[in-house]
Amino acid sequence: MTDADRILGELLKTVAKDEGIKEPQFVIKAISTGGANYTSTLHPITIKSYGMKDLELFAKVACVGEQIREVIPADKIYATERFVYQKLAKIYENLQVKNNIPENEKLKFPKFYACKDTRLEETIILQNLMAQGYTCYDRFKPVTWEYAAAAVGALAMLHALSYAYAKDDPEDFTKSVAERAFEVTGPEEQVVDMLKMSETNALEMVPEELKGRLKKFLSEKSGFENFKNYYVFARGPVLVHGDYRVSNIMYRRKMNFGRIEVGKRILIFITDNKFCRQRRRVNCKTRYDYDTKKNLDLQTANGKLDSLIPLDYQTLYAGVPLVDLLYFIFSGTDGQFRKYYYKRLILHYYDTFAGFLTKLGLNPETVYPKKHFDEDYRHYLPFGLIISISALPVVLIEPEKAPTMQGDAKVADMAIKPNEMFRKRFLEIVKDYIDWGVV
């Protein structure tokens, strides 16, 4: 039995009791994060009981080692995630209910079941969205407009809810943001070394004729103090995600019905509960080799995007909404996407933000007018290039080369040597910043 199995076994007994599950059987699996998650091991879980529907759960168990905890605020990271699912999600849900936000227009959170706060054993158990047909976008592929619009829309709603929280309960909001002020993840010396190493690696990725311009930009806009300042919002703190990228978002597509010819032997994967109730011979969420006796309407997962849920709130902090937005854009888009959709996506963010503020009973022109947003956009725009230097190599790293935060890992280990995929994406970013007159 692994430590994770032991930790989860103890916690799952509480979940089973709370859910009224008698004589439960726990099926605990471990899945590789493939370089998408560094602070936790991930575990799909099924609780089985005779005569009852399986309960599908998903657990995250802390894996940050003692040595690296001495230099980064890992305890705070796990505490923040517990805060989000135990308290903040409820506050945001109540605000949405209070303002009569329709169910299909709400910002969604996965259902919370249990957590453990023992140091080195921090654990959180949520509903398993994968069992409901959700998946993560491929981090190696540039996002599409459909996906980006949905993800940025959800981000705008998250930020708008922070303003609504501040208005609804200013005393509690003030306490929450005070406890989540931005902190650099590590000792200054190690962070400075990591930033310098990342910049050196990035400079090696651009052609000689662009190095001078990039060096000049970095000397003026980068550096430890500038880096910290990008995370401070002069207009007042907003609870922002802090690591909003495709690996920390799950989405689901609508299912299209297609016709299957009589007698054709097929391999199917069905996730629609209504369909499964109609076809009792087919069990939901299971693959079967099935002989059709007549024409059937079966679903294919190539329909329109149906639902999107942000996850992994360990990095939530009181900071700058535009930093979240720029981080998502430059960690997930390529030059081709930005050529056609960049300005549209920025506008879509603010329009969604302003529209959701209105639904929450707030006036966008009073809370955060478009004029201020445009001013802030110009101020924070350099951050997109700066953060791509350190974050994009992590996003695009091959699974077998992903660093670990276990054992004797160090902050400097996160300064990853860029690959060819990074070279292409980063060069496109640099060229965009030249075209925009920033570099």
Image (spheres, rainbow, N blue to C red):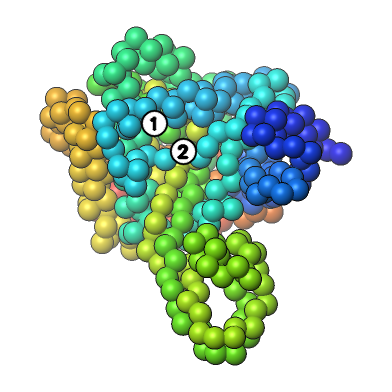
| Point 33% across, 32% down: residue | 97
Point out which mark residue 93 bears.
Answer: 1
Q: Amino acid at mark 1?
A: Glu
Q: Which numbered disc, 1 or 2, marks the residue that appears first in the sequence?
A: 1
> Could you say where residue 393 lies in the image, as x and y percent from the top left?
53, 48
| Point 44% across, 29% down: residue | 89
Determine the secondary structure under disc 1. Answer: helix
Q: Is residue 235 left or right of residue 113?
A: left
Q: How many marks?
A: 2
Q: Is residue 314 left or right of residue 328?
A: right
Q: Are marks 1 and 2 in contact (CB under 8 Å)?
A: yes
Which residue position holds label 2? 109
Determine the secondary structure under disc 2. Answer: loop
Q: Is residue 427 visible?
A: no
Which of the two residues, 436 or 51, is positioned nearer the viewer here? 51
Q: Which residue of the protein is positioned furthest toward the right in this rendering? A: 1
Which of the two residues, 92 or 120, is positioned nearer the viewer here? 92
Q: Amino acid at mark 2?
A: Phe
> Could you say where residue 37 lies in the image, as x and y percent from the top left?
60, 42
> Could you say where residue 238 lies in the image, as x and y percent from the top left?
33, 25
Q: CA distance from mark 1 to mark 2?
A: 9 Å
Q: Is residue 284 visible?
A: yes
Q: Quadrant of residue 414?
A: top right
Q: Is residue 36 above or below residue 334?
A: above
